[in-house]
Image (cartoon, grey):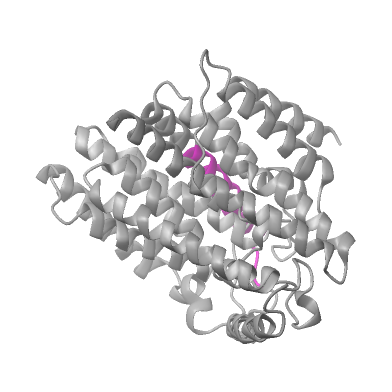
């Protein structure tokens, strides 16, 4: 109880005094609220805590309202509607319609309420906060520094619990590998927090390389976060990060202009890091779920089943869809675990049309980023969105995609500011 009060009051105060940092806290509130679940004796990394209405619901809504008010309290606040605003608005409209005709309207409307209060506000609030920012780049940089440090703290806590307790995977004899996380938190959101911290650290390193500032501390943090991310054994997040970085390389590193001395230090650091991993860390413990864990293969097959089931539902309910909570009637999974499939399952042909328009818009954003690839901020914001969006193809449901809405808010704010400056 005392812990909950401290977290609630502390988060509210930070949202008010430092809205950019408050936004990061809200994004990771599920991890923060579960710090009270930590035990050193016999920790249970597979245990997931029950929902918390106060810290998981009320605090997020209140915090987002505070951040929005603080962000728009300038002399002349502005907010320009774009495609994403309309896309999310139409999604909400379709959720209301489909909820009304679903087999369980009460559950469907509860889902829709969560989408309205705990999902899409991360886009609107983030966008409003940064559009009205006096210095977008400076405030974003400060926010990313905070995100890196917070993810390092999460990583240290998770690692210390395992080291001090001498934790061993209970089902290791059956081929199951340990998935590092904080007790009560599913490994996926924990891995995403660490992944975003790592992505932010790499961005800050690139910025410091361009300005020829010291990067040693950031290199150490990036190396640490890389190890922690690998120990989460969360395939979707790891693949999302790798693909995002590959695209970033295609954007930015095609003709790099980096100081040779710093580049040498960076390459030597990377070489030492991977040498250390190979020599001192069990490769199976880092990559076991990619090639060994039988339960990992089972989850992959369930995702494939979900794909076929989704298309079957789409054909059967072409014009109405089944609503946001009807999927368990057709599958062992509670929802399709795929952003695109959810639109065609929930809304039928209308969801397919909306998703087609969204795909076209993302391609347009890609072209805009390609055109401005010398702007490292544009590249970072686009690959951050990509990092979160790739994971939506295998995990979560519409109202839990906070990272996607948050990253889209950042990207569209920068897009709007730059468009305004050109005019």
Q: Residue at x 58, y 18 (%)?
A: 73
Corner quadrant of residue 167: bottom right
- Reply above or below: 419 against 388: above
- Reply above or below: 280 against 139: below
Quarter of the image with the C terminus is: top left
Q: Residue at x 77, y 56 (%)?
A: 96
Q: Is residue 228 visible?
A: no
Q: Residue extending furthest left?
A: 260
Give the main secondary structure, helix, strand or loop, of the magenta stretch. Answer: helix
Q: Nearer the viewer, residue 138 or 422?
A: 422
Q: Nearer the viewer, residue 316 or 224?
A: 316
Q: How many numbered marks, from 0 up? A: 0
Q: Nearer the viewer, residue 262 or 407?
A: 407
Q: Residue at x 38, y 40 (%)?
A: 415
Q: Which residues are magenta?
A: 147-169
- Reply above or below: 299 against 4: below
Corner quadrant of residue 170: bottom right
Where is residue 44? Give x, y as percent: 73, 62
Where is residue 324? Give x, y as percent: 74, 66
- Reply above or below: 126 against 345: above
Q: Is residue 263 visible?
A: yes
Quarter of the image with the N terminus is: top right
Where is residue 267? Give x, y as percent: 21, 54
In-image side of 128 versus 279 (left or right): right
Where is residue 43? Give x, y as percent: 73, 59
């Amino acid at each position: 109880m005392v812990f909950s009060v401290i977290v609630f009051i502390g988060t509210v105060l930070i949202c008010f005094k430092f809205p950019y940092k408050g936004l990061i806290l809200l994004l990771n509130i599920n991890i923060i609220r579960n710090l009270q679940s930590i035990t050193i004796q016999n920790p249970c990394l597979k245990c997931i805590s029950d929902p918390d209405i106060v810290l998981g619901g009320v605090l997020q809504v209140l915090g987002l309202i505070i951040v929005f008010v603080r962000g728009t309290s300038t002399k002349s606040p502005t907010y320009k509607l774009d495609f994403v605003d309309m896309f999310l608005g139409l999604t909400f409209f379709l959720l209301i319609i489909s909820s009304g005709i679903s087999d369980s309207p009460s559950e469907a409307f509860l889902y829709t309420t969560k989408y309205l209060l705990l999902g899409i506000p991360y886009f609107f609030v983030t966008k409003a906060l940064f559009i009205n920012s006096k210095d977008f780049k400076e405030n974003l940089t400060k926010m990313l520094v905070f995100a890196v440090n917070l993810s390092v703290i999460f990583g240290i806590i998770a690692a210390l619990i395992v080291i001090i307790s001498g934790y061993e995977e209970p089902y290791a004899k059956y081929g199951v590998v340990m998935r590092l996380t904080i007790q009560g938190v599913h490994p996926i959101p924990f891995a995403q927090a660490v992944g975003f911290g790592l992505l932010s650290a790499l961005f800050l390193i690139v910025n410091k390389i361009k300005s020829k500032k010291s990067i040693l501390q950031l290199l150490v943090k990036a190396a640490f976060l890389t190890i922690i991310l690998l120990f989460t054994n969360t395939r979707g997040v790891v693949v999302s990060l790798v693909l995002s970085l590959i695209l970033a390389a295609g954007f930015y590193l095609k003709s790099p202009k980096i100081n040779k001395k710093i580049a040498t230090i960076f390459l030597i650091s990377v070489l030492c890091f991977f040498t250390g991993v190979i020599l001192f860390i069990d490769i199976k413990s880092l990559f076991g779920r990619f090639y060994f864990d039988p339960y990992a293969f089972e989850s992959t097959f369930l995702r494939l089943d979900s794909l076929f089931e989704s298309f079957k539902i789409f054909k059967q309910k072409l014009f109405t869809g089944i609503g946001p909570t009807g999927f368990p009637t057709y599958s062992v999974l509670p929802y399709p675990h795929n952003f695109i499939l959810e639109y065609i399952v929930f809304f039928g042909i209308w969801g397919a049309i909306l998703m087609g328009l969204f795909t076209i818009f993302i391609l347009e954003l890609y072209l805009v980023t390609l055109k401005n690839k010398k702007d490292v901020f544009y590249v970072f914001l686009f690959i951050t969105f990509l990092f979160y969006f790739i994971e939506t193809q295998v995990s979560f449901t519409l109202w839990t995609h906070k990272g996607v809405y948050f990253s889209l808010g950042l990207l569209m704010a920068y897009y709007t500011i730059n468009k305004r400056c050109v005019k």
